Amino acid sequence: MITVPYRRRQVVAPGVTCTFLDAGHVLGSAIVVLDIDDDGAHTRIAFTGDLGRHHLPILRDPEVPDGGALPDHGEHLRRPVARPIEQAGDALAEVIERTCKRGGKVIIPSFALERAGDRLRAEAAHGAGQAPNIPVYVDSPLTVSSRRSSAAPRLLRPGGLRPAEQRRLALRLRGPALRLRRRGVQGDRREARPAIIISASGMCEGGRVLHHLRAAIGRPENTVVIVGFQAEHTLGRRLVEKRDEVRIFGLPYRREAEVAVLNGFSAHADQAGLLDYAESVRRRGKLRRVILVHGEPGAQAVLMKELDERGFPTVDAPSAGQRIRL
């Protein structure tokens, strides 16, 4: 296994080269661009993976490949367009303020490797000017390990972050605002003081966040803040739907806690972002085909319709096992 920097052409097989472009999703995320020469015919295939959003304060914007085919994904389509990160920070501060006035805790399910994401959420909690100075716990062994790993300096090199954020984030990733926990915050201990707890997994299907949810879900003074996409049939989706009863560790719990959904913190491009990205690729060169390979069927259907109305050629959303000849 080797590391390959962004924008360096790497030969992976005779007639096949690979180039990684910045996807702007999380630190190190990449769009895969394959250039394939087969009997004199050249094909470029770009696989976006998860695309990030534009104009975030830390990560760079997603890069756009020149020409070729663009497999993309249609998830997050039915959510409102994500608000600017500053507005999302204000919204989070408001949630924290009212929860603290009730004497409750704020539980934020988070994906473990979103180093930039939990940094933003912590800064929003402490820097928006509306929230009191309360402890913020990051309770995830994987997050703690990724922050302290030998890979951290490489991830902070120029190319992954906006230049203005380079030095600031390097100094503050381990700042005093966050209290990192390997052994866990005692989620079942009903401490008197309020706190913010950021814990994995992001869709509430495993990890330490389940212990915190079990302790918090039945108490009306607490708030669960959903900041990322929640797939169907997950506990996170059931919380987004604000069901009166949810199952945690296989047992039913009545939901008394407030649930706040803040889409502005999502690391994923929304519908408008996906369409703008597809338009950007088309402006760079000939675009022969768009293939939707990720997302719920309803979201894919709507995105296919939007792309078709904009005159994109041959838009497909293949089913499992279906083969498409490129």
Image (cartoon, rainbow, N blue to C red):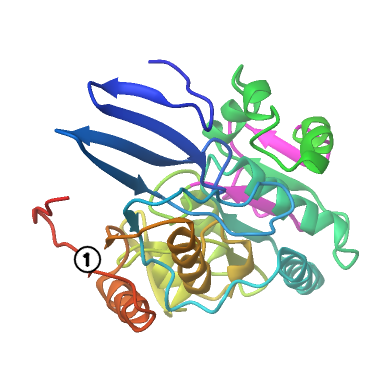
Dot 1 crowding, Cα within 10 Å, few <14, some 14–19, many 20+: many
Residue at 46% x, 66% y is: 274
Q: Position of residue 95 (x, y in %)?
A: 73, 71
Q: Is residue 131 left or right of residue 89?
A: right
Name the one closer to the observer, 61 or 119.
Answer: 61
Q: Which residues are magenta?
A: 174-200
Identify the image quadrant of residue 148. top right
Residue ID at (36%, 58%): 286
Q: Can you tell which quarter of the image residue 26 is in?
A: top right
Against 72, residue 171 (above or below) is above
Asked if residue 182 lies in the magenta stretch, the reply is yes
Residue nearer the viewer, 221 or 42: 42
**In the image, is 204 to the left or to the right of 174?**
left
- Compared to residue 38, the image places residue 300 above or below, namely below
Image coordinates for residue 296, horizontal then vertical, percent = 29, 68
Q: Main secondary structure of the magenta part?
A: loop
Residue sitting at x 34%, y 61%: 251
Give the image location of residue 124, x and y in percent. Answer: 78, 58
Q: Indicate the position of residue 7 as horizontal and vertical percent values.
A: 52, 32
Residue holding disc 1: 317
Amino acid carrying mark 1 in the image = Ala
| Residue 199 colored in magenta in the image | yes
Callout 1: SS: loop
The image quarter in which residue 207 lies? top left
Residue 158 in view, yes or no: yes
Q: Quadrant of the N terminus?
A: top left
